[in-house]
Amino acid sequence: MATKFKALVGFTRMKDDELMVTAATIIGAMTDNVHFEQPTPTLAVVQGLLDDFSARLSASRRRGSPEETALKNESRLPLEAALRQLAYYVNSISDGHLSTLLSSGFPTNSAGGSVQVPLKVEGVKLGDGRQSGQVRLDFARQRNVLVYEYQFRIIGGDEWSERFTTSSSRANIIAPLAVAERHEVRVRAVNTQGTGDWSDNASILVR
């Protein structure tokens, strides 16, 4: 019997970072997607829930209080529910058509065990941006990865910045940065199977 492909609807076992990246990937893939013209719930609703969860997650990591952690966990539940509802919509529209399913950004049952945790990101390069206080970030693209995370800090600093996400391996602009200070940047790849190792740090003197 032929396999009927479908978007997966289980999100409860995902780690917080993985859920956030998965939701962002889905929103990006379904925005202006001709296959899914009337998503239910709307992408704006899902984005709002993701923004709230992201803010709660950042607050819980900064302060680490039981109250902040509880608020983060509470904000996660409606996001999971919205993604499940959206997955049912995607499955009803795609009706097992694999390429349509994959265009939604949802993890599917098509991969089997072929997709693995991403490799360490290589080829991280920094260059001057067009304006003072800007840096351009480029790195080697990986297959089966739709989202990358990066962080930066002044060399010698104790803490990295918050994690930023991008779907592109080229021409990412980091700003604003302190002029005449040497900064370092690191990148890692994320897919539905997990998070890869951080890259080697790349550094640049910001002009």
Image (cartoon, grey):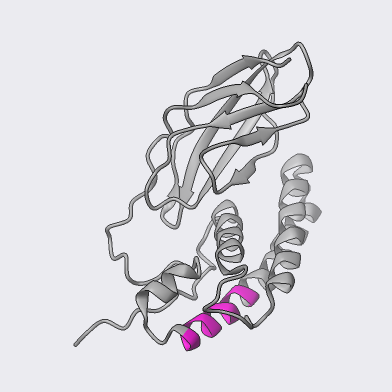
Q: Nearer the viewer, residue 32 or 163?
A: 32
- Residue at image position (69%, 73%) is 78
Q: Quadrant of the C terminus?
A: top right
Residue 65: percent from left, percent from top: 78, 47
Q: Nearer the viewer, residue 188 or 79?
A: 188
Classify residue 5 as left or right of residue 190. left
Name the residue at the front extreme: 130
Classify residue 71 as left or right of residue 155. right
Count up the numbered dots: 0
Q: Find residue 30 and report its image quarter.
A: bottom right
Q: Nearer the viewer, residue 145 or 80?
A: 145
Looking at the rendering, the stretch of residues picked out in magenta corresponds to 82-93
- Residue at image position (58%, 78%) is 86
Residue 141: percent from left, percent from top: 43, 40
- Residue at image position (28%, 60%) is 113
Q: Is residue 207 depicted above or below 160 in this figure?
A: above
Residue 148: percent from left, percent from top: 53, 44
Q: Nearer the viewer, residue 199 or 53?
A: 199
Q: Is residue 42 depicted above or below 142 in this figure?
A: below
Q: Is residue 86 shown in magenta?
A: yes
Q: Find residue 158 and report its image quarter.
A: top right
- Residue at image position (78%, 16%) is 179
Q: Is residue 100 depicted above or below 22 in this figure?
A: below
Residue 38: percent from left, percent from top: 64, 83
Q: Quadrant of the N terminus?
A: bottom left
Q: Is residue 114 shown in magenta?
A: no
Q: Is residue 74 visible?
A: no
Q: Main secondary structure of the magenta part?
A: helix
Q: Is residue 96 visible?
A: yes
Q: Is residue 114 depicted above or below 195 in this figure?
A: below
